[in-house]
Image: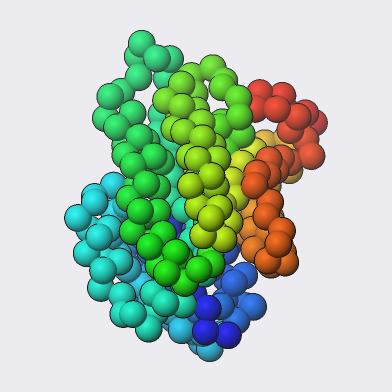
Amino acid sequence: MNKYIFITGSTSGFGEACANLFAQNGWDLILTGRRRDRLENLKSKLTSQFGVKIEILCFDVRKLKEVNESIGSLSLEITSKIEILINNAGLAVGRDPIDSGIVEDWERMIDTNIKGLLYITKAIVPFLKKNKKGHIFNLGSIAGKEVYPSGNVYCATKHAVDALSKAMRIDLVEHSIKVTNIAPGAADTEFSIVRFKGDKEIATSVYEGFQPLLANDIAETIYFVATRPKHVTINDLTIMPTAQASATVLWKE
């Protein structure tokens, strides 16, 4: 197929699920993340199963120098074939009222969810413009549509992702580059484990009593959107578990 998809945060959750699904459908991959062992294992598994080409880049999206050096190491043969960027790297850390929030948690979310997305996009867009086509997916959240108690800074970062998705669409429309904001509701990935800093008991309790979204639900949605005809762009999708009506309304049995 000779088409590459660039996926940030590909070592778990939505990113890993997207890597699996696109590889299954013949796409070559550029997988990025901070955990080299997971990147190596994923590369080995997918090349063995599907015979696709895979490049791995181990870096932290929060660090501009690392982003630019890693992406700059890719050959022209590869960058000329990048057609999709999935800005998946992101997280929530802590769930405290604004006056008792931990500044380090705020900075980690802002640096990853906003600045990291910007760093990656700025580095990849020139390839898409040169290729005169492309599709950017930004992983937002229902937290980018609504705010909820003690979600303050996380919600603010995902509202920023929502706004940036709209702004990118406007800036890039003349270059035939599509931009899609994906806003999931409750999804059972590593999200809550990270948010509650490794407390698996609390993280697991978040999803008790209802069927949350799974990583593959989001991957299948992204694949569907990515395979629409050239003249069709889906700008924004909010995807919820059937049991969830809003950020704070969940029907638990």
Q: Is residue 191 above or below residue 228?
A: above
Q: Is residue 126 above or below residue 210?
A: below
- Looking at the rendered image, the quarter that the N terminus falls into is bottom right
Residue at 79%, 39% in the rendered image: 242
> In the rendered view, does 106 fall on the left or right side of 208?
left
Give residue 152's position: percent from left, percent from top.
46, 21
Q: Quadrant of the C terminus?
A: top right
Which x, y percent locates residue 28? 50, 79
Q: Is residue 101 visible?
A: yes
Please count the marks in the image.
0
Q: Is residue 45 visible?
A: no
Q: Nearer the viewer, residue 159 or 22?
A: 159
Left or right, 34 with reference to 158: left
From the viewer's side, name the closer residue of 236 and 88: 236
* Image location of residue 183, percent across then percent down: 61, 41
Q: Residue at x 29, y 54 (%)?
A: 60
Q: Quadrant of residue 95?
A: top left
User: Looking at the picture, how far across and down is residue 24, in whole percent?
Assistant: 62, 78
Task: Tell me what residue is drawn at x 33 percent, y 28 percent.
Answer: 106
Query: Which residue sits furthest front?
Result: 174
Q: Is residue 50 above or below residue 154?
A: below
Chosen colour scheme: rainbow
Residue lying at 35% horizontally and 14% vertically, measured from the top left: 100
